[in-house]
Image (cartoon, rainbow, N blue to C red):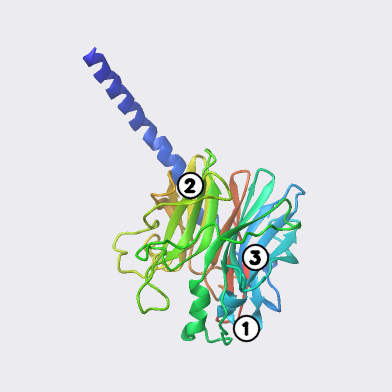
Amino acid sequence: MKIKLTISFLLYATYLLAQKPEINKKIDSLDLFSMVQPVPATHIFSDTAYNIWCGSVTKAKSGKFYMFYSRWKRELGHEAWITHSEIALAKADNPEGPYRHIKVILPPRGTQFWDGTTTHNPAILPYKGKFYLYYMGSTGKSYVKPHTSYNNPNWWEYRNNQRIGVAVANDPEGDWMRFDTPILDVGSDSTAADALMVSNPAITVDKNGRFILIYKQVEKKTGVLRGGKVRFGVAFSKSPNGDFIKHNKPIFEAKDSEKEWMVAEDPFIWHQQEVNYAIVRDVVGKFTGESGALALMISTNGIDWQPAQHPKVLANKVYQANGKAFDDKLERPCLYIEQSVPKLLFGAMGFEKRKYSVNVAVPLK
């Protein structure tokens, strides 16, 4: 009997090993970099009065396409995103656009609210007939002179007050329900990796109905306004509204990155073929070898992430259809997928040393 069990175990182990190449192939076959095409001028969404940042795109049952984006007046300067950003809605007949502004859906609502002055970093999730919009909110009462940003201590009040919330609607153009408390707050332990602030939410739901929320986190550092290291955390929930339970360690870590202030930035995540994928900005080149490029990460559990077999998604230089490179690298990526096939890579980009900013849609062949 013991011999039979041993043989059975060995056969099962051999079976598992035989399955490994198939699993790896499924996980590692995606090569977004090989699909990247130059960006036509018609794939740029801009507004002469406003800076545009972020850009989360989804398709509604009506067949129309909606972009949830952040905007603030150009005259205030790029760094005014933390004090004056509001989340707005744009609409198009095709996924690449052209998009036209419809309305502001998360405007300022008073400094007594956690998201009273600022809404930013939209990430849309259609789920069971409703639309869930995850976002960063902030508030503050101090005056921040335009164009002072990092040199103004008051600027950091708003930056450090960032928290993550969700708004819910039955239709993108309908009324959005906001809540009086964030769904993800800072850690209660002063030594936690997210003790100072949380922002940049990215959301997906896996085949088991588990919601995976990835978020930017900053640790506290005594006497330092900006805090300590910037990392990313992950939290899980059985409901789109929470409660989200945090994993206790940062994700997207890399070898020899302990001394780095920031390793990854701007995640976009999705679940496909039983695998979790993420696109992140490779801040110091730990994943792709190119600082500022976009990297593809993979995970089966949402906690342990590693670079994919084809880690580079987009170089730090993006080219227009006329052959010229854009002035800036692409940030805040959002991948539009149609019938399991990636079609467009949306992202924010500055022009003229970020005198103004837009959203661009990079075609994927």
For mark 2, give the secondary structure.
Answer: strand
- The first of marks 1 and 3 along the sequence is 3
Q: Position of residue 22 (x, y in %)?
A: 42, 35
Mark 3: which amino acid?
Tyr
Task: Give the alpha-carbon distance from disc 1 to disc 3, as whole Å.
Answer: 18 Å
Circle 1 crowding by C-alpha within 10 Å: few under 14, some 14–19, many from 20: some
Asked which quadrant contains residue 358, the reply is bottom right
- Determine the image quadrant of residue 9: top left
- Asked whether the viewer can see residue 324, the reply is no
Tag shown at residue 276: 2
Using the image as rendered, state which of residue 355 and residue 301 is in the foreground.
301
Q: Which residue is mark 3?
A: 69
Of 56 and 340, nearer the camera is: 56
The percent coordinates of residue 147 (x first, y second) are 56, 86
Tally of numbered discs? 3
Q: Which amino acid, mark 1?
A: Leu
Q: Residue at x 76, y 58 (%)?
A: 173
| Residue 124 in sight in this render | yes
User: Viewer-nearest of labels 2 and 1?
Assistant: 1
Residue 30 falls left or right of residue 108? left
Determine whether 342 is above or below 350 in the image.
above
- Estimate the spatial distance between the alpha carbons at disc 2 and disc 1, rounded to whole Å: 38 Å
Locate residue 287, reporting x and y percent.
39, 59
Residue 76 circle label? 1
Q: Which residue: 61% across, 61% down?
A: 180
